[in-house]
Amino acid sequence: MSKLSKLDPYKKVIFALKDKGKSCRIISEHLNEKYNFEIHARTIQDFIQRHYQPNVFEAKLEDSNFNVNSKWSHGWLKTKEASIFIKNKEGIISFDEMRAKFITEMSEYSPAYKKVKRKPITDKHLLVVDIADLHIGKLADKSETGDSYNSDIGVKRALDGVNGILSKAKGFPIDKILFIIGNDVLHIDNANKSTTSGTTQDVDGMWYKNYEIARDLYIKIIEMLVNVANVHVVHNPSNHDYISGFMLADSVYCWFRKHKNITFDVSNAHRKYFIYGKNLIGSSHGDGAKMADMPLLMANEAPSQWANTFYRYIYLHHIHHKDVTKFKSGKDYQGVTVEYLRSPSGTDSWHHRNGYQHAPKAIEAFIHNEELGQVARLTHLFK
């Protein structure tokens, strides 16, 4: 007995009409009229897929490149019969997989830089360049706060500040540059115009455009610095852009990963340490551990570097104004100097409302002699 003969009368009509190229809607209307049944078109469609063409769904998936083993999470299968939303539980890509794929692809296309050959320096100095709390994407209106600020102003101040610092540092033989990045370089961390914790901000521009602006700015600055000396880049995670700031630092690393004169420490560790001669230099955003706890944290987290150095400094950010404390570790020892740095960013509505303004806006830098510790402080001020 044939498959068709086993079917009840209305199913035979479905096959007959389908053979004539009728749509599910027309078939449904015909059956409802002929048998006085209430048959929905979707029921007809489901039946046809199960019985009329047993492999139609699988075939359509194959034709549309919906391979169950491929890395896709969802999509629409659109045919003349139906428009179907499909979820692929087996092919969902995790965040870690996506990030690894992104890094791999970007790393393969990193620009090729020639290694810079430099003349030997006997009296060696380290230049620390630290653009604290740039807040690309912050919006400040002069009529409200007495200060204008946006992404364009932020980029201009960063470039002017770095150029000013390099000009002031020309009197010193610079052997190495420590470039500290992060520290709220981006004003927001999502499409909701808020910080990582959800605090809404006054914003200039779209989040993705500001990410690109910050990325291009860092690339330009690092290319400027490496013309002077070899560069070590350190990333400090921060409260405004904890997620996007890390991804930004990671993308800058991928860009310069083939450069022989540039090294990176862009992990998400909240405190970073760098040794230069007899100097131990720490940096952190400053929104977490208290200032008074920083020296002991340094001693515990970098014990070998602590033991092998004589001059110790920690540079903090976050509060946008100057604050310096010197912690003594003994009569004959300098101990640790902990210092909050000024910011070049403007005063927004929240800071103005709470009276957190009028501190000098600046980019600061420091020069450390390999044997004698910090020997100069450089400041580029903005009016």
Image (tube, rainbow, N blue to C red):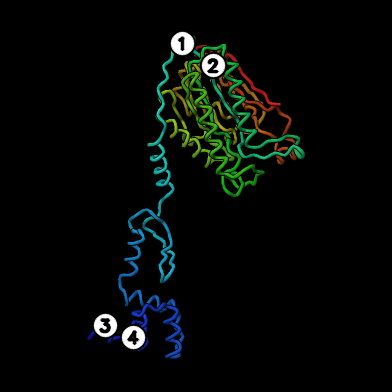
On the image, the x and y values in percent for residue 150 come to 65, 37
Residue at x 55%, y 35% (from the top left corner): 214
Q: Which residue is mark 1?
A: 121
Q: Is residue 83 visible?
A: yes
The disc labelled 1 sits on which kind of residue? Ile
* Distance (Cα) linking label 2 and label 3: 89 Å
Residue at x 44%, y 30% (from the top left corner): 256
Residue at x 45%, y 80% (from the top left corner): 40
The disc labelled 2 sits on which kind of residue? His
Q: Which residue is mark 3?
A: 3
Q: Residues within 10 Å of mark 1 (few under 14, many from 20)?
A: few
The disc labelled 3 sits on which kind of residue? Lys
Q: From the viewer's perspective, tell me whether residue 257 is left or right of residue 358.
A: left
Quadrant location of the C terminus?
Answer: top right
Q: Mark 2 against mark 4, which lies toward the viewer?
A: 4
Q: Residues within 10 Å of mark 2 (few under 14, many from 20)?
A: many
Q: Which tag, 4 or 1, sits closer to the chain's start?
A: 4
Residue at x 39%, y 44% (from the top left corner): 101
* Distance (Cα) linking label 1 and label 2: 14 Å
Cβ atoms at labels 1 and 2 below 8 Å apart: no
Cβ atoms at labels 3 and 4 below 8 Å apart: no
Q: Residues within 10 Å of mark 4 (few under 14, many from 20)?
A: some
On the image, the x and y values in percent for residue 187 come to 61, 40
